[in-house]
Structure formats: C-alpha cells, structure tokens
Amino acid sequence: NAGVTQTPKFQVLKTGQSMTLQCAQDMNHEYMSWYRQDPGMGLRLIHYSVGAGITDQGEVPNGYNVSRSTTEDFPLRLLSAAPSQTSVYFCASSWGQSTSYEQYFGPGTRLTVT
Amino acid sequence: AQKITQTQPGMFVQEKEAVTLDCTYDTSDQSYGLFWYKQPSSGEMIFLIYQGSYDEQNATEGRYSLNFQKARKSANLVISASQLGDSAMYFCAMRELPSGAGSYQLTFGKGTKLSVIP
C-alpha cells in the first residue's frame, strides 16, 4: 500500500492564482481531512469528509474548497491564493469517525504564495 | 479556550534519560480519544500512541507511555531511555465531537520541540 499520497510536494503561487492540491489514499478509509501547519500553531483542520459525497468545514475553511467524488481522492482547491495561505498542507485519512481511529498522514505539500 | 495545551515549547533531555512532555485538554464530552504524534525534521507526521477516554490502563507502546489523568484532563507522554532519533516536534491531539459539528474532529496542540543531547 502507498498509504496517503499528496502532490505536489512543493508549489509557489502568485497572489490570485488558483490551484488544486491532490490527495489520495489506497486504504479504503472513509474519513479524510486536510490540515494546515503554520509555525507555532500546530495543525489546524481546514475541511474533512466522512465519505464520498459528504464534506464539511473545519476550523479554518475560508479560501478553500473540497469535494469527494470517490473514496480514494480528496482534493483541496485554493480559489484565489493569498500570502496568508503560505503554509504546509497535510492530508490525512482514517477508517472512520470513531474516537479511537488514528489518522494516517500524507507527506505534506509546502505552499508559498508571493 | 484552547482545547489542547502543550505548555513546553521546547525541552532538552540527556540521551538515555526519560522525559515527560505535558499535555492538557479541554472537553465536555465523555467519549474522546487522545493521540500523540511525532514530527521529525523531515516533516512527516508519525503516530506514536493512543488513549481512549474510557481506558482505565495507561497506554504503552515500546518506549512510549501515556500518563492519563482523566480528572485533571492531562495526557502526558513519557519517553523512556531517550535516543538521538527522538529529537523532533511532538504533538498532542484529541479526537472528539465538537458542539454543533457533524463529525468527530482531531484538534492538535501547538507542539513541543524535544532535543536529545548526547
């Protein structure tokens, strides 16, 4: 199993550009989520999905869109990039919603918006 | 109020010594899960240990143990016999069903940077 994969690893955008961060998992996990990590802030939840066709907002959803058309894929779209979105983005997945299920993380995407 | 508080931004420990990383949490739920993750300088997030709110025994995984004090809402990570490879950021996290939310969510603390000294 590849686990959770993310592409690209690095990206530089200009303010106002849009792009999609890709995330895929091959573990048949129901639950997928996106986090951003900023220095001194830990990881903060952007959006999450409890299954194909079902998504919801986390703590910091503004400026981001998600969709979940398949169990495997959960892309994150930046609609109009801003310097405040410079961050490291992690995708994660778990078997389900139970409090006991650990989340498996992808390797991260480092995004810089100039 | 923060849901997860890690009060030690940075810590040093001598190689082969034990170290405790502090974590306190805030929730009104009875059912929740507590996790510790390690993030080395390479950036990946590595799951270390899990404790359920109903578990009566403290969780252990090899050199890692979780000192769970439910009444005090604390879930400290203890690393025994520290190794140079333990130098990393450590994050405490809680999975719960936030008020008004549709699903369980994982909330992270801000992390503790551990440095192991030879």
Image: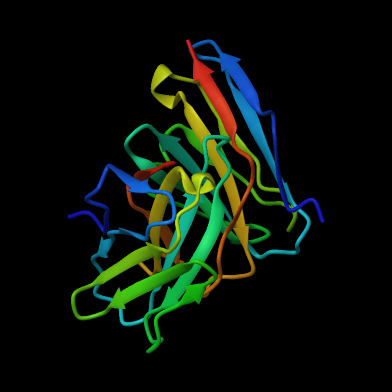
Camera sees residue A42: yes
**Closer to us: A68 or B30:** B30
- Give residue B111's position: percent from left, percent from top: 35, 47
**Closer to us: A107 or A113:** A107
Is residue A73 left or right of B112 when viewed as pictured? right
Camera sees residue B100: no
Quarter holding residue A63: top left
- Give residue B114's position: percent from left, percent from top: 38, 45
Query: Which residue occupies 63% across, 23% down?
Result: A10
Quadrant in the picture for the C terminus of chain B:
top left
Residue B13 higher or lower than B50, as above or below? above
Quarter holding residue A38: top left
Query: Which residue occupies 37% across, 65% down?
Result: B78
Is residue A2 left or right of B103 when viewed as pictured? right
Query: Which residue occupies 25% across, 69% down?
Result: B74
**Closer to us: B111 or A35:** B111
Quadrant in the picture for the N terminus of chain B:
bottom left
**Closer to us: A12 or A66:** A12
Residue closest to the far bottom: B56
